[in-house]
Amino acid sequence: MDLLRKEKFHLPEGVIYLDGNSLGPMPKDVPLAVNSMIENEWATHLIKGWNECAWMDQPKRVGNKIAKLLGAPDGSIIMGDTLSIKVFQALDAALSLRSDRKVILSDNGNFPSDLYMAEGLIRLKSAGYELRTVPPEDVANSINADVAAVMLTEVDYRTGRRHDVQSITEKAHSEGCVMIWDLAHSAGALEVNLEGSNCEFAIGCTYKYLNGGPGAPAFIYVRPDLIEQIQPALSGWLGHHSPFAFELSYRPGEAIERMRVGTPPVIQLAALEKALDLWSDVDMQELRDMSLKLSRIFIEGVEARCPSLELISPRNNHERGSQVSFGFENGYAAMQAIIARGVIGDFRAPNVMRFGFTPLYIDETDVKKAVDTIDDVINNRLWDHPNFLRQNRVT
């Protein structure tokens, strides 16, 4: 099977897009699907669409499609809300499963929003809870019987460094801890086996490698043998057992349905559901192998020609996700200059230039052209211009 399918995506002429790890490009079939939903469902059926167009079933139906990509059984993943909300849900559920313990363990490279949600949850809890963050390399040795939940992102958003899901989950379980994995930079980028890992919870977003579009809904996975024990803290109307009975007290819904909160974003789910069709015949191991090959070519090219850039991603392929990051003192301005020349990556403070490698629309020719552009910008100081030094709100 040929992984490359550039013709399936809207990619502006002359642009090499190395930022799918932040926001995936739009599949060409998405506008038709969304327009059909708007014109043939919403406009035609009005409120009847909830029943006649199965809008209420979307979160579970789309969740089952994602489950196939993540090695999870049907009925274990539900869609909706944002990743931050799903982090909160998973954390609160994890703490309730270990009510005699008070520590949430994470690493200091985790995405800040995950840590912010943990801090907010702790403020709502009774005294004694603690968020403990350690360097990524110290996580395994920091898991002990004080820890209620270990919350980690498999692939570091800044450096691309990858945790070993299996070994860390096994260590967490050996100490009686609950394991939560954030798959924001894993889903659609590399092989995931949630069922095989035996982790209790996983969460992730769908606007990166899965191409669901800006604001696309997040997902949450709960290990099926645990779901009936979960009493959701965010006890939303649509997570109720019988929403349209309008009972005054909450009763959790059946199985994964209880992790729903608010009204499903029907238009956004229509876009995501169509985008997921692209994955029906993708071999994830083949995709991963090609991603590593492309990133290796990129690393070798940039290091040979731009010695002022420092590789901050792991050099070992298998310790890295599908992105490569270089440090540069003037990284923000340099990235703006590179983008202005048609190679789109992004920047993360304090000095990180990030580039993502998605073999569905990136090939070796693109990678080599990107290296040429970076060489030109860095070695000819093309970034040293007022237009590139002025920082935008979104970096």
Image (cartoon, helix red, strand yellow):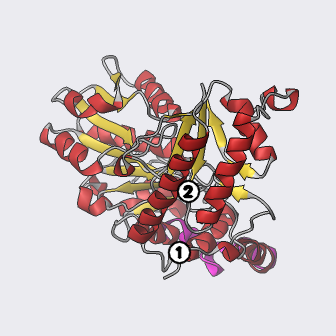
The type of residue carrying mark 1 is Leu
First to last magenta residue range? 43-60
Q: Which mark is residue 357?
A: 2
Quarter of the image holding residue 330?
top right
In the rendered view, tell whether residue 330 sits above or below residue 198: above
Q: Would residue 351 be found to the left or right of residue 34 on screen?
A: left
Separation of residues labelled 1 and 2 (CA atoms): 13 Å
- Residue 54 highlighted magenta (yes or no): yes
Q: Is residue 197 magenta?
A: no
Q: Position of residue 270 (x, y in %)?
A: 65, 70
134 to 43, vertically: above or below: above
Question: How packed is label 2: few (under 14 Cα within 10 Å), some, or many (20 or more)?
Answer: many
Q: Position of residue 132 (x, y in %)?
A: 33, 23
* Residue occupying the point 52% across, 37% down: 158
Q: Position of residue 290 (x, y in %)?
A: 47, 65
Q: Is residue 318 visible?
A: yes
Is residue 171 shown left or right of residue 371? Answer: left
Q: Is residue 153 above or below residue 359?
A: above
Left or right position of 370 against 388: left
Disc sitting over residue 3 in the figure: 1
Q: Quadrant of the C terminus?
A: top right
Q: Amino acid at mark 2?
A: Phe
- Does label 1 or label 2 sit earlier along the sequence? 1
Secondary structure of the magenta portion, mostly? helix
**Residue found farthest to the left:** 174
